[in-house]
Image (tube, rainbow, N blue to C red):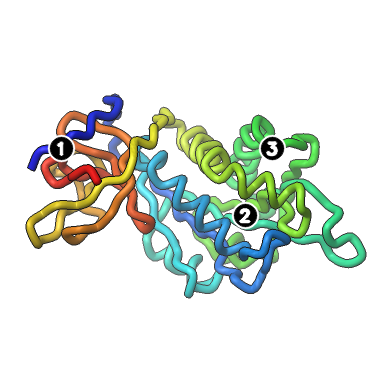
Amino acid sequence: MSTKLKPHIMDVKEVLPMPSIYLSPSTQEYNTTVLGNSEEYYMNLIADAMEPYLAASGIRFGRNDPTMTALDSARQANEGGYDFYLALHSNAAPDPYAGTVRGAEIYYYPGSREGQRAATIFANNYKEIYPLPDRIKILPLGTFIELNKTNMPAILFELAYHDNLLDASWLSRNINEVARNLAISVADYFGVEFVDVRYFGQAVISTDGGAVNVREKPDINSPIVAALPDGTVVKVFERVNDWFLIEDGSTAGFVNAEFIRQL
């Protein structure tokens, strides 16, 4: 099937082997932000938005799901042999300071040189977009499960204070900018080129009833990361020769243009 989609053509470098990251957005649905939605909701939006940037930059990723605990996530990351672990959270100040504190904290396991290096990279890049760059802190802490139970370098990033109206509002308005900034930091940490992507629009998987394979790279021999059924609505970001970079809310990767139809 042909498509009328004609997005920008990007150049993707082959990176072998692909570096890998485990994304662990908060599963704390009970942490309600001042805007009404949960910490879990916003952190998962950010993780969703990161995926196309990671896929385009040749970075393999895995991810937890909202039913998992922090220990579940750490174990799954260890079993998957990922190279880096990124926990995404937002913060809240204790009484009597609730609602009055702003800032971001990046935690790494004490003594982990790679964790500290990653925290420094993420902090420096985040200063480019966060409205109060002098309030971004890097802190060693050994009590977080996602730092002391992971086998790979890891950081836990508290992106803003969700009980502060200004912080929470800024974060909610800048989901994609934050996601892009985090993806840049991931690429910087791995020493690979960050490949920017442009959102083109929505499309639908069209297979006449079957499923289509989503691949890590725009190549028929590239590993399969998921299979999407006929009729799945996806976001389309870029085209690489006969392949589209797509994201469906749970995965991102490349699908042959033959199976993409404009809505």
Looking at the rendered structure, the number of numbered marks drawn on it comes to 3
Q: Position of residue 149 (x, y in %)?
A: 56, 66
Nearer to me, 184 or 153 = 184
Seen at 12% across and 42% down, the residue is 220
Q: Amino acid at mark 2?
A: Leu
Seen at 27% across and 25% down, the residue is 9
Which sits earlier in the primary sequence, circle 2 or circle 3?
Answer: 3
Element on which disc 1 rests: loop
Element on which disc 2 rests: strand
* Closer to viewer: mark 2 or mark 1: 1
Q: Position of residue 5 (x, y in %)?
A: 22, 34
Q: Whole-Å distance between the Cαs marked 1 and 3?
A: 39 Å
According to the picture, the residue beneath numbered tag 3 turns out to be: 130
| Left or right, residue 213 beside residue 116 | left
According to the picture, the residue beneath numbered tag 1 turns out to be: 3
Q: Amino acid at mark 1?
A: Thr
Element on which disc 3 rests: loop
Which sits earlier in the primary sequence, circle 2 or circle 1?
Answer: 1
Q: Whole-Å distance between the Cαs marked 2 and 3?
A: 17 Å
